[in-house]
Image: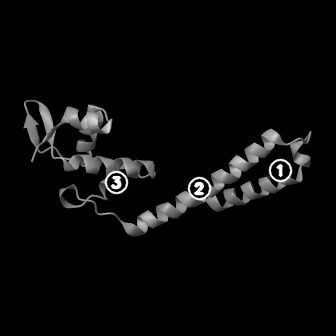
Amino acid sequence: MKLLDIGEVAEATGLRVSALRYYEEKGLIEALGRKGLRRQYGPEVLQQLALVALGRQAGFSLDEIGGMFGAGGAPALPRAELKTRAAEMRDQARQLEALAQMLGHVADCPAPNHLDCPKFQKLLKLATRAQRRAT
């Protein structure tokens, strides 16, 4: 098995070496040894780091992501938690779409006073409902 030098891992992932050291400190990845002073990783580290990146994009904390790795760094993904997060993201997407519609209407509305515009009033009510659900 060819080991990857920390610099190679950084180049392949776009992460800074300091971030890789931090991820190792948090237990997200593990160096298999050293060559001189440079950490060496197995090729599976690239997949582990891709899972970390995906988790970060989904809004999980590093501690939450760390809990998604089982023995030897293999993924142990909590399906129920992922379904919950996916539902939250879909709800957030709906809220963002409503906000984008409202902003687009405000920008294009010919009414001299937006508060007199029936469509704007409808969009305000939708935004208020979405806010109530979020709290």
Which image quarter: residue 95?
A: bottom right
Q: Are marks 1 and 3 in contact (CB under 8 Å)?
A: no
74 sits to left or right of 79 = left
Whole-Å distance between the Cαs marked 2 and 3? 21 Å
Q: Mark 1: give few (<14), some (14-19) or many (20+) Cα within 10 Å.
A: some
Secondary-structure class at tag 2? helix
- Position of 17 relative to 118 (above/below): above
Q: Where is residue 117 in the image (x, y as percent from the top left)?
A: 89, 49
> Can you see residue 28?
no
- Amino acid beneath label 3: Ile
Q: Residue drawn at (65%, 62%), measured in percent from left and top?
A: 133
* Most distant residue in the top direction: 37
Q: Residue drawn at (8%, 34%), measured in percent from left and top?
A: 35
Secondary-structure class at tag 1? helix
- Amino acid beneath label 1: Phe
Compare marks 2 and 3 and give the one earlier in the sequence: 3
Q: Do the residues labelled 2 and 1 touch (CB within 8 Å)?
A: no
104 sits to left or right of 73 = right
51 sits to left or right of 41 = right
Q: Residue drawn at (23%, 38%), measured in percent from left and top?
A: 9
* Most distant residue in the bottom direction: 80
Residue at mark 2 = 92
Residue at mark 1 = 120
